[in-house]
RNA sequence: GCCCGGAUGGCGAAACCGGUAGACGCGGGGGCCUUAAAAGCCCCUGUCCGCAAGGACAUGCGGGUUCGAGUCCCGCUCCGGGCACCA
């Protein structure tokens, strides 16, 4: 009785609406296994997913981050990423673009090699098996991938061109070799790039990274810092990614100031971002590794300095870079502060790092926490040169005053007193420059990219060393420098590559003079493989060039790239650098590889990251087998906002599967005679608009919700749906559940693929409501709602509202003000 | 410390430009069908008070602007991510 039974519908009529008057016990569920296998086969046979690489008139390059083919197989994270990209690609195709969506394998690298070592396999034999397993899993996922253009970075026909890329950079002077302190992972027994070190630990295995001095190949990515940073402003990229790159590049503006050493011709150059505080510089500090450190040391200090330098060298990288109690030692020398004219002591301390700036600083203990701490410990003078609104030049400093506002003024700074910090910075820098003491400079945190790896499973660096000719690049015609099949590929602690144990491999005649010479025995970083793979895809089967000029012009730069943000400062930065370098070398006509990049979120489970140790890893195979790839794909897209990720719950799939079953049921039973219902068509066009708007912003979860809502409308219509009501829905669902949509499309009588059927056209006149609901508020509190024809104005709405007793009772006296938001709300202020 | 995100029912989440908070889905409750179960279908489901009609309270916390704030402003807390003895 009462409210519960008011809207209740007879059950039989419900059933008829679903099953089209057929036997009421017949289930509506479809069989995804059969449907999916059928269409995967058909698409492969008919080349549905292939694009005309040479004739496309509206090219659209949709890229996803190619996976590293692990032995564990495809991860849900992979599928989540790929599905999001696939939906975008399929949608673009239906909008009329010629979509190229390739995929391949990032098969070289420490990952694969370490796994092979662990299980006692050989990477050259293991990798093809893993690739085959991935291929099987990916084919079941129903991605619209043009597999003809597959790449595998560990194959000769690919790494030959990786070596070619190295040679181009070398030719342009962007590759150089130097002995340097590098990050050494004692566990992986190889050098790591700075980007591969997280807080002093190897980002791969977590081992504490050590410093070693080795001869390494570097790429001059540092020279591109300004450009890499500047271009970020114009790229259509996720903000999280741009911000991570900005932080990593770490630009800071300041000045390089020269301090002449007293009674010597030596000059200590320091970098500072606060030239305005130079009057407060009471001592200088050199990094222990600084070349002048020994030069400036007086005889009396020599033993102490040597001991300190020795102590520093033996530190591991984590300790070296961690914040701890300040230590240091005086050189015994002095240098002149150009601003004050005073001679200030020169110290050596390990809180100054050789790799940043000039490796030397002017210490302003009054306004830098570290300098303050150091000055206190070693009883060095602390001078205030900035004071806040409530302070004077004489107010004692109990701690370093670092932050500042426009109210902070310079003090104890001679004729610069009373300038604001910002003014001081500009005027002081100018004054220092005019007098030859300083130059305005920009400093970057970004360092050159170390690409040498003392490992086996990668492309050999194409360089030969000859006693007579020196460092000789391998001629391009002699590429690839093949990676030999060796048994003893295990790395060791020597810092020498496994290839260096094979004389028969590294002893070669010099390409220039023919004299006996020796190959470089290091291989290149895996990130070089992936820094240019997007250039290779369109030309993947071309053995003559790295990338065909015409195809590259047609397809690149990439229109849409979707991937994980864990690659923000590795792969994505390196790819941009290599692209810029190839542009500068005249090989390509664009200097940014990815016009649009979107970072997707992370799939977690039970509120935690998936990991084998927690036992909460999802095996996609199981879910695909139980629910079908279409349901699994759609669920992954439904569980949260794509760009934020979400929590995977097995139970959640059932709701999506029910939706697809219902879609299947209404397509199968759709009525052909008669005309579609006006009210239903209105809802349909509203959904077309919603889904069309949501797809470009990757708002997949709300697009799915809207389609489900429309499906509910169809079911509640208490009649069999008309073909005209379901057909466009099939097209909207197609990017999400491609197999089922294709099946439905055939059932609806079409002979060509739904992906070539276009995108449903939105008709605003059909979507328009004739009657609208207006919320009525009294003093801002919602007290009821009225239904009025869409065209009526404020007066009629107010009249309708006052006619409702439950609203009118709150309106005591004459309204003071009426606020009317057309089509939405009426607020009566009394 | 600096820079990016974020916080909404039992749960995952919606909410255009400041305008009906909680769409959609899961879970839960009740019902239909069934010999029974499963499946399917129908209804209900933010919290509190109330027999009901209805009312009050609700978007991490504290203020503010506004006729009206999840949304804007100021000040915090907590969570995720990036950078960090970076001068």
Image (tube, coloured by chain):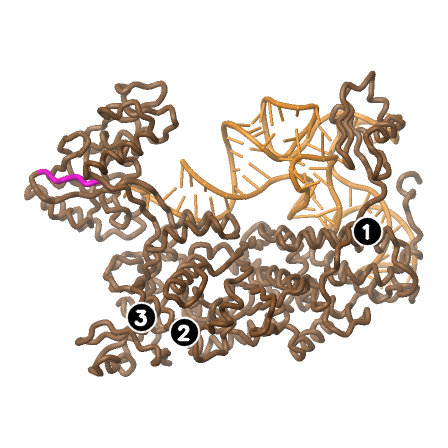
Dot 3 falls on a residue whose secondary structure is loop
Dot 2 falls on a residue whose secondary structure is helix
**Which shade is chain A?**
brown
Tell me the residue that label 3 is attached to.
A522
Residue A448 relative to residue A89: left or right: left
Say if residue A32 shows up in the picture: yes
Of badges 1 and 3, nearer the viewer stands: 1
Residue A777 drawn in magenta: no
Image quarter of the N terminus of chain A: top right
Say if residue A121 shows up in the picture: no
Residue A179: % across, % down: 23, 61
Q: Earlier in the sequence, mark 1 or mark 3?
A: 3
**Chain containing mark 1:** A
Dot 1 falls on a residue whose secondary structure is helix
Residue A766's disc number: 1
Query: Residue A19: which quarter of the image?
Result: bottom right
């Amino acid at each position: 009785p009462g409210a519960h039974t008011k809207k209740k519908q007879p059950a039989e009529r419900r059933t008829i609406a679903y099953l089209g008057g057929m036997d009421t016990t017949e289930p509506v569920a479809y069989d995804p296994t059969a449907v999916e296998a059928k269409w995967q086969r058909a698409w492969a046979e008919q080349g549905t997913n292939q694009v005309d690489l040479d004739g496309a008139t509206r090219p659209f390059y949709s890229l996803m981050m190619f996976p590293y083919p692990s032995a564990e197989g495809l991860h849900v994270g992979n599928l989540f990423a790929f599905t999001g990209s696939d939906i975008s690609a399929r949608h673009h195709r239906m909008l009329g673009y010629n979509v190229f969506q390739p995929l391949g394998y990032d098969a070289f690298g420490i990952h694969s090699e370490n796994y092979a070592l662990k299980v006692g396999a050989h990477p050259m034999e293991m990798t093809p098996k893993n690739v085959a397993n991935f291929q099987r899993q990916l084919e079941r996922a129903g991605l619209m991938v043009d597999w003809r253009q597959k790449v595998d970075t560990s194959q000769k026909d690919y790494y030959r061109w990786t070596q070619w890329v190295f040679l181009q950079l070398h030719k342009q002077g962007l590759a150089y070799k130097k002995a340097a302190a590098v990050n050494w992972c004692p566990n992986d027994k190889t050098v790591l790039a700075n980007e591969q070190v997280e807080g002093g630990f190897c980002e791969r295995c977590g081992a504490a990274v050590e410093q070693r001095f080795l001869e390494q190949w570097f790429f001059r990515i540092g020279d591109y810092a300004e450009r890499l940073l500047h271009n970020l402003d114009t790229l259509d990229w996720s903000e999280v990614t741009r911000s991570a790159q900005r932080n990593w590049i770490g630009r800071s503006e300041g000045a390089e100031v020269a301090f002449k050493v007293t009674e010597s011709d030596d000059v200590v150059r320091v970098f500072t971002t606060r030239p305005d505080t130079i009057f407060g510089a009471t001592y200088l500090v050199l990094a222990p590794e600084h070349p002048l450190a020994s030069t400036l040391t007086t005889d009396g200090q020599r033993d102490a300095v040597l001991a300190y330098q020795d102590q520093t060298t033996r530190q591991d990288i984590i300790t070296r870079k961690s914040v701890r109690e300040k230590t240091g030692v005086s050189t015994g020398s002095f240098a002149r502060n150009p601003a004050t004219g005073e001679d200030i002591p020169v110290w050596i301390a390990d809180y100054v790092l050789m790799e940043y700036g000039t490796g030397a600083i002017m210490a302003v203990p009054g306004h830098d926490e570290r300098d303050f701490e150091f000055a206190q410990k070693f009883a060095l003078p602390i001078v205030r040169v900035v004071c806040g609104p409530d302070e004077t030049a004489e107010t004692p400093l109990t701690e370093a005053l670092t932050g500042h506002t426009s109210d902070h003024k310079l003090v104890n700074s001679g004729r610069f007193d009373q300038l604001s910090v910002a003014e001081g910075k500009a005027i002081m820098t100018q004054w220092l420059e005019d007098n030859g003491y300083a130059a305005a400079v920009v400093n970057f945190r970004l360092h050159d990219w170390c690409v040498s790896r003392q490992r086996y499973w990668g492309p050999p660096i194409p360089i030969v060393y000859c006693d007579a000719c020196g460092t000789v690049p391998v001629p391009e015609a002699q590429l690839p420098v093949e990676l030999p099949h060796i048994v003893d590929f295990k790395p060791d602690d020597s810092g020498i590559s496994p290839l260096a144990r094979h004389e028969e491999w590294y002893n070669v005649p010099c390409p220039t003079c023919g004299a006996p010479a020796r190959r470089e025995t290091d291989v290149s970083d895996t990130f070089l493989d992936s820094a240019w793979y997007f250039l290779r895809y369109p030309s993947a089967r071309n053995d003559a060039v790295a990338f065909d000029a015409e195809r590259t012009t047609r397809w690149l730069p990439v229109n849409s790239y979707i991937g994980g943000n864990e690659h923000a400062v590795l792969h994505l930065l390196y790819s941009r650098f290599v692209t810029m370098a190839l542009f500068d070398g005249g090989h390509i006509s664009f200097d940014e590889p990815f016009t649009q990049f979107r970072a997707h979120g992370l799939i977690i489970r039970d509120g935690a990251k998936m990991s084998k140790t927690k036992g909460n890893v999802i095996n996609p195979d199981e879910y695909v087998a139980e629910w079908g790839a279409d349901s699994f794909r759609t669920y992954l897209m439904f569980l949260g906002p794509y760009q934020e990720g979400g929590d995977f719950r097995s139970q959640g799939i059932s709701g999506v599967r029910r939706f697809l079953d219902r879609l299947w049921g209404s397509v199968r039973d759709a009525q052909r005679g008669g005309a579609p219902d006006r009210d239903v068509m209105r809802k349909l066009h509203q959904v077309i608009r919603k889904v069309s708007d949501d797809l470009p912003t990757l708002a997949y979860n709300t697009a799915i919700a809207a389609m489900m809502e429309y499906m509910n409308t169809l079911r509640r219509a208490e009649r069999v749906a008309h073909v005209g009501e379901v057909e466009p829905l099939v097209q909207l669902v197609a990017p999400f559940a491609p197999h089922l949509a294709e099946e439905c499309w055939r059932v609806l009588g079409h002979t060509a693929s739904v992906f070539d059927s276009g995108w449903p056209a939105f008709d605003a006149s059909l979507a328009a409501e004739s009657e609208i609901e207006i919320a009525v508020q009294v003093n801002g509190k919602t007290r009821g709602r009225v239904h009025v024809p869409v065209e009526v104005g404020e007066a009629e709405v107010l009249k309708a509202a006052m006619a409702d007793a439950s609203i009118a009772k709150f309106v005591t006296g004459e309204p003071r003000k009426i606020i009317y938001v057309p089509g939405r709300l009426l607020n009566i202020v009394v």
